[in-house]
Amino acid sequence: MNSVSLKQLAEHLGAELRGNAEQVVSSVAPLDKAVSGQVSFLSNPKLRHQLDVTAASAVILSQDMAETYPGNALVVKDPYVGFARTAQLLDSTPNAAEGIHPSAQIHPSAKLGTGVAVAANVVIGANTVIGENTQIGAGTVIGPDVIIGSGSRLWANVTVYHNVHLGMNCIIHSGVVLGSDGFGYANERGNWIKIPQTGGVRIGNNVEIGAGTTVDRGALEYTEIHDGVIIDNQVQIAHNDIIGAHTAIAGCTVLAGSVTIGKYCIIGGSCAISGHLTITDGVHLSGATNITNDVKEPGLYSSATVAMDNRLWRKNTVRFRQLDELFQRVRKLEKRLDTEE
């Protein structure tokens, strides 16, 4: 467990320290659960009452919140960001691997950089290159001709197919599959003819991919995930998709093939995006939104209906089916009124 003084933590955050600079802290906790030796934060004004009773040894606060707080305070512009950086500094998460386990199967042509750690039952294929200080968790399988950048961490039971390029400082969680075949078939008189997926996957630096997510390989070229993208659990990225830098995609979202998503987008959970579409930079899709056309302007888009009583939902569903008929009737009435005038 890491421990730092508040003086050291303030220097790390670029924060103004108010209080005991020598106080030592070793972990983070919510305001209402924190005890001595822990750091907490307040970013939601609705939780202001918890500040009066917290037992935290220090609290990360904005300037206005810190004015009336009598305890040790680390004053920053954005307390939530301050909390995130503090949590990184005090992170106690164990490594995915230590050393090279004797059960690992590493092809003689594979090249491992200095400090690479490989856990039990890992398989690493021919001509694969793994950068220094990367950690490969137990049971992970890495195919041939793969490149993994330095400082990355692959947790247990990740599967990386052939011809996948993964950047530096990436985090790939358990159950992720990178480079599986895209869903490519031709139909010949009712029979499905498989199209070999001969492309690959290219993933940039500082990308995090959540547990159980699948990124399919390109049909002929590459599926691309650019720098700084974060992807939640159980997401489907289909063949030839391109995801722009620093975009965030929440859980259970599905992208069909050949979708291009711009930079700095936020895609809510359970969204569905049809194939061969382009979403521009700075788009925010709320949860369960279905996209069936290009999105050409940044902004917030939604399409899901809210939950309601089932009987009302049934009535509204029937009325929704009648919208076109109602529209045509209104047009006829408008034309009749125009003629009468």
Image (cartoon, rainbow, N blue to C red):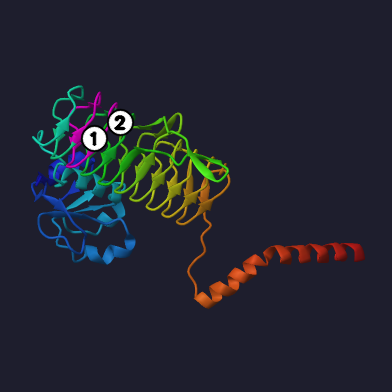
Q: Which disc, if any, is residue 243?
A: none
Q: Residue at x 34, y 32 (%)?
A: 204
Query: Which residue is at 68% across, 67% downward?
Result: 322
Q: Which quarter shows the C terminus?
A: bottom right
Displayed quadrant of residue 329: bottom right
Query: Within the magenta stretch, is there residue 312?
Result: no
Residue 244 visible in the displayed image: yes
Q: Are marks 2 and 1 in contact (CB under 8 Å)?
A: yes
- Label 2, on which residue? 167
Position of residue 266 measured from the top left corner of the image (x, y, whole percent): 43, 47
| Magenta range | 123-145
Between 258 and 51, the one nearer to me in the picture = 258
Labels in figure, total: 2
Furthest-top residue in view?
109
Which residue type does callout 2 highlight?
Answer: Gly
Residue that mark 1 sits on: 152
Image position, residue 185 (x, y; %)? 49, 40
Q: Give the residue type that dot 1 points to.
A: Ser
The residues bearing labels 2 and 1 have C-alpha atoms spaced at a distance of 8 Å
Ranked by sequence position, the earlier of labels 2 and 1 is 1
Instruction: Give coordinates of residue 316: x percent, y percent.
Output: 59, 71
Q: Residue at x 47, y 57 (%)?
A: 288
